[in-house]
Structure formats: structure tokens, C-alpha cells
Amino acid sequence: QAPRGLKYPGEAAADEAGRAVDFIGDINGDGLDDLAFSAVGADRGANGSAGKVYVIFGRSSPFNGFGLDAGHALLGLADVTILGPTTGQLLGWSVSAAGDYNGDGFDDFIIGGAGNLSNVAPAPTTLIYGRASFPTTIDLQVASPASHFAIGTSTSGSELGWTVGHTDLNGDGLDDLLIGDWAAGGTEKGAVHIVF
């Protein structure tokens, strides 16, 4: 029997769709795991390489996608598209489940935006809260404390968010965020940040 599955190609040349991909838990509370993957080179208008992250909700009915060998574009197939805030942010350099960070019963997920070493304001790492209903687009240029929050640094040359993860480090029943920054300190000493 031939392999069965789906393919979600990038929207445009140099988007680098699939740079990071992970199952992110059940972020909409329907009992099915969901998937997120990034296209770090995706543009938002004139803002080159702002990056995008796409979310595909789990479902028992047929998926909205294409066969493994189809050559269609991703545009319009994702359930949620998350837009990087500005030029060179490379949103989605890393993507990970975050457990239930805020204890509301919905799984959350974390997105690292590594940016690049010439950025004066390095890309923030963003936690997206789970909820019963999501908009089709989440624009990270727009502050929305009920939807997401950003963890950033003002240090030029940082690569905060190069790696991300989660665990309940302090045993309080809530997941904590792990954020790697290999370039921290300006001399590439590196650092690992833990957010309770």
C-alpha cells in the first residue's frame, strides 16, 4: 500500500516552510492534538523575512490539504496564520508545545523568532494562549494580552528564541517556559532563560 498523508508547501520562494514543526497539544480544547509549523522567510508586505507560523487543527474529518506529491501552495489551508511583527524577525525559528502555562485548561504554545545578528531589536519569543475559538490571523504587531505575550530582550546581537521548550520545573502544576539564546552576552557566551 502506498503511503498516505498530506503536504503543505510554502506560499512563495524562500519562505522556508517547515523550518520548525511540532505537535503543540490540544490548543482549542476539542480533544485532538494540533500542529504548528513555520515559514521563517515569509514576508509581510514590505517587511521581508518577518516570518509566519501556521496552525493546523486536528480533526477526525478529512483534512484541508493536498496529497504528498501535490505542488499546491499553502495559502488558505492553515486554520490560523500568525504573522511576524517586522522585518528580519524570522518568526518561527523554533516552535514548541508549552503545556498549560496559564492553567486555564487549554494547551498553549511558544514561538521563537531568532532574528539575525544585525537586528538592533532582536525578535521576541511569543507565547500563544490556547482557547476554544481562534481567529484565522494573529498579527504580532498588535498587542493582545488575552491572546499572547512576548518575551524580549533589548540586547543587540541576541538570538533569544533559537530554541524553546517547556516543563514544570518548580512542581507547581503549571508549565514553565524554556528559551535558549546561544548569542547572549555579545561574545556568544549564550544563556538559557526560564520563565515561571
Image (cartoon, rainbow, N blue to C red):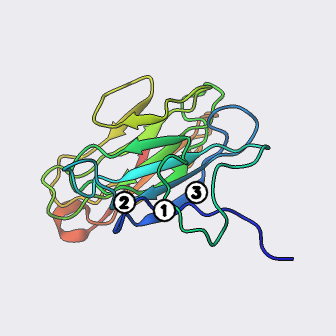
The Cα atoms of the two marked residues, 3 and 2, are separated by 15 Å
| Residue drawn at point x = 32 percent, y = 46 percent | 84
| Left or right: 31 as drawn, with respect to 72 | right
Does residue 68 show up? yes
Whether pointer 3 and pointer 1 mark residues with C-beta atoms closer than 8 Å, the reply is yes
Q: In the picture, residue 67 is in which quadrant?
A: bottom right
Q: In the picture, residue 17 is in which quadrant?
A: bottom left
Nearer to us in this view, 118 or 13: 13
| Residue drawn at point x = 51 percent, y = 32 percent | 129
Nearer to us in this view, 167 or 98: 98
State the residue position of label 1.
20
State the residue position of label 3.
22
Whether pointer 1 and pointer 2 mark residues with C-beta atoms closer than 8 Å, the reply is yes
Residue 35, labelled with which disc? none
| Label 2 environment density (alpha carbons within 10 Å; few <14, some 14–19, many ≥20) | many
SS assignment at label 2: loop
| Label 3 environment density (alpha carbons within 10 Å; few <14, some 14–19, many ≥20) | some
Q: Note whether 111 is above or below 104 in the view shown.
A: below
Residue 40, labelled with which disc? 2
| Left or right: 44 as drawn, with respect to 29 | left
The type of residue carrying mark 1 is Ala
The x and y percentages for residue 3 are 78, 73
Q: Note whether 17 is above or below 173 in the view shown.
A: below
Nearer to us in this view, 94 or 153: 94
